[in-house]
Image (cartoon, rainbow, N blue to C red):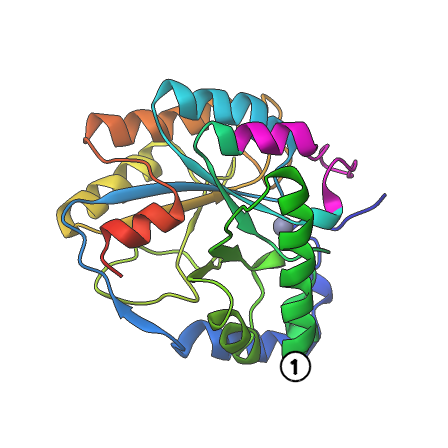
Amino acid sequence: MRVPADKDVADDVPLLARLSHRVAMHFRTAPTTLACETPLVSLTFDDAPLSACTAGADLLGVYAAAGTYYIAGGLIGSRHAHWELADDERIARLHRDGHEIGCHTYSHAFLPSLSPSEIADEARRNVDRLREIVPGLSIESFAFPFGYASLAAKRALRGIYRSSRGIMPGLNVGRVDRYFLKALPLIEGRIDADGIARAMDDALARKGWLIFYSHDVAIRPSAYGCSPTLLEATLRAAAARNIPCVGIVEGLRRARA
Ligand SMILES: [Zn+2]
């Protein structure tokens, strides 16, 4: 099964969708003021590659950190050009271990192509699939597949989730868009331990919420993932500054959003 990874499609995106995405990036549909008493870090993993749920989750556990895994139910247990995806048992274990399960649509859909009713249908199918694994699971967080949004998609998501995360870099502080939370890539070659330390210092100084996104966690990661060394550097940098690593729902709660 060939499933495009986040960003694989970026070069093929039609101009209209690119424009729509740019408007969505800059037009806040749910302005929210964050009031964090302390800085926060969230580590998020899109698609839930198996390695993020094994090596990645093991490292999070060592540092008592909770991650958020955005899962597309239609991909569960499948193989992919870049990685193998977690199966039911592994996802159940993530939940048992205190990690957050978020939504990434059911079919890893490109949101700008979907109508609001199709987006709602993706949400319904995904929660149904995930509740086969964890009965009664509540899903409150969403991440845009491929990082692509549109204004219509953001509006549709407001009725379904409490937040959505994009891939626009930056620190979440003060007035933010809850349906386009900013995130830094925790991706090999795009950030290093020094860059992570600088971002943490900024979060510390401004009492902001720093969200990272990644995919697989492997010694030789894909072009979309990180090594265990880079993940551990992030966890260490947060621990050294006493910055808690929390899931997205918990981050929103602590930010009193
Ligand atoms: Zn994805």
State the image coordinates of residue 182 (x, y, percent, origin top left).
Answer: 39, 58
Does the magenta-highlighted stretch encompass residue 250? no
Numbered range of the magenta stretch? 75-94
In depth, the one of 225 and 50 nearer the eye is 50
Task: Report the quarter where the C terminus lies.
Answer: bottom left
Left or right, residue 247 beside residue 209:
right
Q: Residues within 10 Å of mark 1 (few under 14, many from 20)?
A: few
Q: Residue at x 64, y 73 (%)?
A: 112
Q: Residue at x 64, y 58 (%)?
A: 105
Left or right, residue 245 beside residue 159:
left
In depth, the one of 196 and 175 nearer the eye is 175
Does the magenta-highlighted stretch encompass residue 91? yes
In the depicted structure, whether residue 146 falls above or below residue 46: below
**For the stretch drawn in magenta, what is the main secondary structure?**
loop
Name the kind of residue labelled 1 in the image.
Answer: Leu
Question: Outermost residue, right direction?
Answer: 1
State the image coordinates of residue 197 (x, y, percent, origin top left).
Answer: 28, 35
State the image coordinates of residue 183 (x, y, percent, origin top left).
Answer: 41, 52
User: Splitting the image into 4 quarters, where does residue 14 fall?
Assistant: bottom right
Q: Residue at x 34, y 28 (%)?
A: 235
In the depicted structure, whether residue 227 falls above or below residue 166: above
User: Splitting the image into 4 quarters, where does residue 32 fall?
Assistant: bottom left
The number of numbered discs placed on residues in the rendered structure image is 1
The residue beneath circle 1 is: 16
Element type at marker 1? helix
In depth, the one of 46 and 10 nearer the eye is 46
